[in-house]
Image: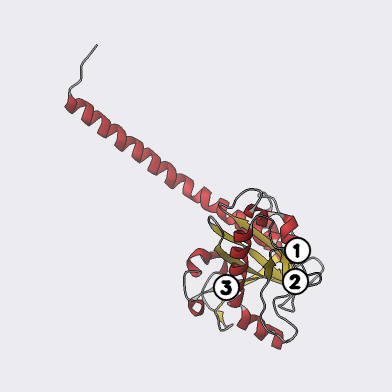
Amino acid sequence: MRDFSNTYIFVFSTVLIVVVAVLLSAAAMLLQPLQQRNVEIEKKQNILASINIEASRKDAEKMYDKYITNSFVVNAKGDKVEGVDAFGVDMAAEIRKPLDEREFPVYVSTLDDGSSKVIVPVRGKGLWGPVYGYLSFNDDYNTIYGATFNHDKETPGLGAEIATRTFQKQFDGKKIFDDQGNFTSILIQKGGAAPGDPHAVDAISGGTLTSKGLQATLKDCLSGYIAYFKKQQEQK
């Protein structure tokens, strides 16, 4: 059996580590465009899901181009921000800013029946990680048309239930302003919302902290759209 010197072993190990590191870096660089494309497709699927349109990965881009007819960014004063791509706004970064410094993406959809919906993203903290999603509104800028939520690390069977259609469908028809025009957001009530309450849905059974996190997320994110929604309502 051949004996190798310590110097040989050290040099060989160093070269091997460098070669592997170079190969891994090259693989990561080659795969990055594909990974980015997958993220974009999933984002388009989620936006479409908020208007109750289920799109596969294969047809998501075609469906998005068909139904999303406009997109732009507004600020907390309700004014449009020129030169900013709504799709490219990083919500994880935006929610770390003070409300009056954030950029708020808006997507406009025209459905097959000719009706217009406005879609906004939401993002915040769940129990174990971020929760995020999209809400679509009718053209009264008050009544929710559809909702989709997702998470990274919530507990299966408990907090992870926010990603189910059963939970999400509760938001259909709910309102974020009361009859006097005051912002209410949407309450997620432990023990169940009162029958007929237009501003509340049932919390997740066993997922109290995730429910509270989502409720806080909705209030925080939607409050940034109040001025814009009010301006649109006044123009009706």
Position of residue 5 relative to residue 48, above or below, is above
Q: Quadrant of the C terminus?
A: bottom right
Residue drawn at x 51%, y 69% as measured from the top left = 95
- Where's residue 164, x and y in %? 70, 54
Position of residue 29 relative to residue 19, above or below, is below
Residue corresponding to mark 1: 170
Q: Is residue 231 left or right of residue 25?
A: right
Q: Quadrant of residue 222?
A: bottom right
Residue corresponding to mark 3: 220
Residue closest to the eye, 63 or 202: 202
Mark 3 is on which residue type? Asp
Q: Secondary structure at mark 3?
A: helix
Q: Quadrant of residue 177?
A: bottom right
- Where's residue 123, x and y in %? 57, 65
Q: Is residue 20 left or right of residue 28?
A: left
Residue corresponding to mark 2: 174
Mark 3 or mark 1: name the one nearer the start of the chain: 1
Label pair 3/1, CB-CB below 8 angstroms? no
